[in-house]
């Protein structure tokens, strides 16, 4: 059965992309020291969107100086309630300009407008609104009687949720009285630069937020800058370990949100249709570019065949294509490099003996695309069961007993997320306790909220973001 | 005249008291340079055995009820109280302080056990939360033990820093591999004898004596150690442990204060659980 949909494109008239962008330092857009720039493209069309200034170490230094000045002269002296009011203003302006942010994010990132409009942007604004209210309540944050900010925080964010990750980083940092230098991902700088405009509209004091665009070397200059007090990083486990080594012995603290290989466990009494929806949301949300994706499906053996059949039928209905079309479920892969990685790891699934299945789908000629894919017959030793693919690729394994499910779920160096599908309450709580993961979704998956702490066990990182527990990571004497 | 019976100071691994597999010991002298004892000089292999024992004991200790753990920590205080004379003598001998000062330290250490005993079944209440989600979900956060923790206790004192490091780690449901102060190892061995008679399951706390600079790098690089209390390490060793510890992203903390719930929470992980609400 196929459903035919007429095109329902979202208008791009609301966004106004400049030909070239500078760095945002001390409240103004400024040119980088060198003349080096890099392009950001629309991954759905491969068209160049804008030239972006490349920040060298000397530009990072300027940004840190600006953040330090703003910290010591303005931000740390401001009454907490007034500080909070700026965050409220930012939240309101983001809501006012929500559609603009959503369209821009979709163009720069490739993710469907349905997701940017309904999830990324509203959640980002909610993050600012939530943390705004914390600014004058820090003594209740769990960081002791005399909570103090770290000072200047260097923040490095990934390309999978560009604006949302900015909000996760910037909102708690500002609420707790820190100032920030933020480096957006190389392939998705545009919404961060639009956010800089929001800071200007909100009248945020100059230097409280600084944004430096660039690549890994720019990020490294930020991590190694001697006047940065704390690092907050979201990205790969490999880079996270590098940061941990780089700051060893410097006294800098760090929050790291790294990779995952989330197990999504389906017990034989689970409500099967609801479970199928949850599995699809768990792995195909945001093209699978999600560190907490439910990328390892663990199915109780006696329901495997029935579940896989229903899952395939459901996946056949996924609409892949133009991210700006309001009907699109699965958009473009963010970059050629990421597409190559997905292809490389997935091909190991073929060569290691797993069975690949994708629905028939017509992928656009231009742009970066990967069809929704599942591998069945996967074993624990397979690369596709151990390594993070970060794409729309699901690995299916089976188990017989609940204990076997837990043992397999925990059998990775990661520990970010896990899912549990069962109608039995006591089994949910038992499994939730056994699973070594920071976020457990029971009979749901991939849900996020500013009030809910997020972060991983083991090699998925250090610390939490969101909620009271995430807030205190930005306070000295706080929980790690 | 009767010749008194001296004690052999051994390691404490998995509830047993072995000598070092390496056969090595090192000499401890008192504040006036008189010989006191030859405690074991633990090797890398001893450390690995201790980590295996700690990992093996984790499920049982972490799975025990908080009330049960609380009672066992209190039992340690009871057993220490009974043997306080021995601790007083060791402290006076090693640190060269008066018996009065030594007694005060022992009392503080015993009281620290009592304080942390009370935390076992309260830390989740104080540090956990239910979170108001914008949607029909029930969402709660609880702290859980991080796993196997390597401990390098502060070594300004012979006993107090040791207890202030071990108590919060096991109060949070972790198991521990302790590298005792190189200079003041004797109280650590006596403390292990207290633990062995306190209903503390074997392997929950393992204590090694030896050369800190020899053992610290192995602790840092051991992939089955989840976290490290680096309070007693020099700056150089701390840095080395942080660099090698990055291989499995160990949680490494150094403390300047004691007797705060933050010392328990530093070795706990927050787990957040979501479930839909509906009919």
Image (cartoon, grey):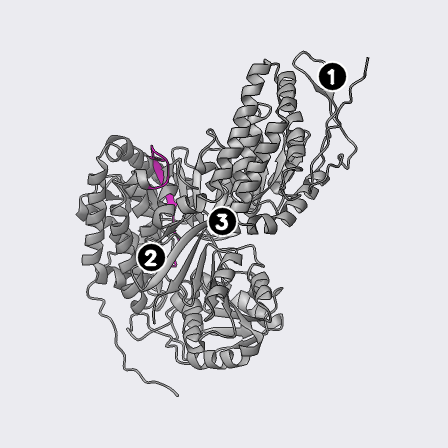
Q: Chain of mark 2?
A: A
Horizontal arrangement in the rendering, residue B268 relative to residue B95 (left or right): left
Rendered image quadrant of residue A406: bottom right
Which residue lies under the disc numbered 1? B35
Asked whether disc 3 touches disc 1, contact meaning CB atoms under 8 Å apart, the reply is no
Q: Residue at x 28, y 32 (%)?
A: A69
- Which label belongs to residue A206? none
Asked whether the viewer can see residue A21, the reply is no
Marks 3 and 1 sit apart, C-alpha to C-alpha, by 44 Å
Assign a secondary structure to mark 2. Answer: loop
Residue A208 locus on image (x, y percent): 27, 40
Magenta span: A141-160
Q: Residue at x 49, y 75 (%)?
A: A269
- Which label belongs to residue B144? 3
Q: Does A103 sit above or below residue B147?
A: below
Which residue lies under the disc numbered 2? A449
Rendered image quadrant of residue A336: bottom left
* Most foreground residue, A476 or B109: B109
């Amino acid at each position: 059965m196929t459903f035919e949909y007429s095109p329902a494109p979202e208008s791009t008239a609301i966004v106004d992309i400049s030909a070239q962008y500078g760095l945002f330092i001390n409240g103004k857009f400024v040119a980088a020291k060198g003349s080096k720039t890099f392009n950001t493209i629309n991954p759905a069309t491969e068209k160049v969107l804008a030239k972006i200034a490349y920040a060298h170490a000397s530009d990072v230094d300027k940004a840190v100086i600006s953040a330090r000045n703003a910290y010591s002269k303005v931000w740390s002296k401001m009454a907490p309630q007034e500080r909070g009011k700026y965050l409220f203003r930012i939240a309101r302006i983001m809501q006012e300009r929500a559609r603009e942010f959503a369209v821009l994010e979709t163009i720069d990132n490739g993710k469907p407008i349905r997701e940017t409009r309904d999830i990324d942007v509203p959640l980002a604004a909610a993050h600012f609104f939530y943390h705004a209210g914390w600014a004058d309540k820090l003594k209740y944050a769990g960081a002791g009687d005399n909570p103090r900010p770290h000072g200047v925080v260097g923040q490095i964010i990934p390309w999978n949720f560009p604006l949302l990750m900015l909000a996760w980083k910037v909102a708690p940092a500002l609420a707790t009285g820190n100032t920030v230098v933020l480096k957006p991902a190389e392939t998705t700088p545009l919404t961060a630069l639009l956010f800089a405009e929001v800071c200007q509209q909100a009248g945020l004091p100059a230097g409280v937020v600084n944004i430096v665009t660039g690549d890994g070397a720019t990020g490294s200059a930020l991590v190694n800058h001697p006047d940065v007090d704390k690092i907050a990083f979201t990205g790969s486990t490999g880079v996270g370990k590098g940061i941990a080594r780089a700051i060893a012995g410097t006294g800098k603290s760090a929050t790291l949100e790294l990779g995952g290989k989330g197990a999504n466990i389906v017990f034989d009494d689970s409500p099967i249709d609801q479970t199928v929806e949850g599995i699809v949301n768990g792995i195909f949300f945001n093209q699978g570019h999600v560190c907490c994706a439910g990328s390892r499906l663990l199915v109780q053996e006696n329901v495997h065949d029935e579940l896989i059949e229903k899952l395939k039928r459901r996946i056949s209905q996924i609409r892949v294509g133009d991210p700006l079309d309001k009907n699109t479920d699965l958009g473009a892969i963010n970059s050629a490099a990421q597409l190559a990685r997905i292809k490389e790891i997935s091909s190991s699934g073929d060569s290691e003996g797993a069975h690949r299945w994708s629905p028939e789908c017509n992928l656009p000629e231009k742009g970066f695309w990967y069809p929704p894919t599942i591998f069945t017959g996967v074993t624990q030793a397979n690369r596709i069961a151990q390594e993070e693919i970060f794409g729309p690729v699901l690995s299916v394994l089976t188990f017989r007993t609940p204990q076997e499910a837990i043992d397999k779920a925990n059998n990775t160096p990661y520990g970010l997320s896990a899912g549990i599908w069962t109608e039995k309450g006591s089994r949910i709580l038992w499994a939730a306790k056994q699973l070594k993961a920071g976020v457990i979704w029971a009979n749901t998956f991939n849900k996020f909220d500013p009030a809910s702490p997020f972060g991983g066990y083991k090699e998925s990182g250090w610390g939490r973001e969101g909620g009271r527990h995430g807030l205190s990571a930005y306070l000295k004497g706080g929980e790690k | 005249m009767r010749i008194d019976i001296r004690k052999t100071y051994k390691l404490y691994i998995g509830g047993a008291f072995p000598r070092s597999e390496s056969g090595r010991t090192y000499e401890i002298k008192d504040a006036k340079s008189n010989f006191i004892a030859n405690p074991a000089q633990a090797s890398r292999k001893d450390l690995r055995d201790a980590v295996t024992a700690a990992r093996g004991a984790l499920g049982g200790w972490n799975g025990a009820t908080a009330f049960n753990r609380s009672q066992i920590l209190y039992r340690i205080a009871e057993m220490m109280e009974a043997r306080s004379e021995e601790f007083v003598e060791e402290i006076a001998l090693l640190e060269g302080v008066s018996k009065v000062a030594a007694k005060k330290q022992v009392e503080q250490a015993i009281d620290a056990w009592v304080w942390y005993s009370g935390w076992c079944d309260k830390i989740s209440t104080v540090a956990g939360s239910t979170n108001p989600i914008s949607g029909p979900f029930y969402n709660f956060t609880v702290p859980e033990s991080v796993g196997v923790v390597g401990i390098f206790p502060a070594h300004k004192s012979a006993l107090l820093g040791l207890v202030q490091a071990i108590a919060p780690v096991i109060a949070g449901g972790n198991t521990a591999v302790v590298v005792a102060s190189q200079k003041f190892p004797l109280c650590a061995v006596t403390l292990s004898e207290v633990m062995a008679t306190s209903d503390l399951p074997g392997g929950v706390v393992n204590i090694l004596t030896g050369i800190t600079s020899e053992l610290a790098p192995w602790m840092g690089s051991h992939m089955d150690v989840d976290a490290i209390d680096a309070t007693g390490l020099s700056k150089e060793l701390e840095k080395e442990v942080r660099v090698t510890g990055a291989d499995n992203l160990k949680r490494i903390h150094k403390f300047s204060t004691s007797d705060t719930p933050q010392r328990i929470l530093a070795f706990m992980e927050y787990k957040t659980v979501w479930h839909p609400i509906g009919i």
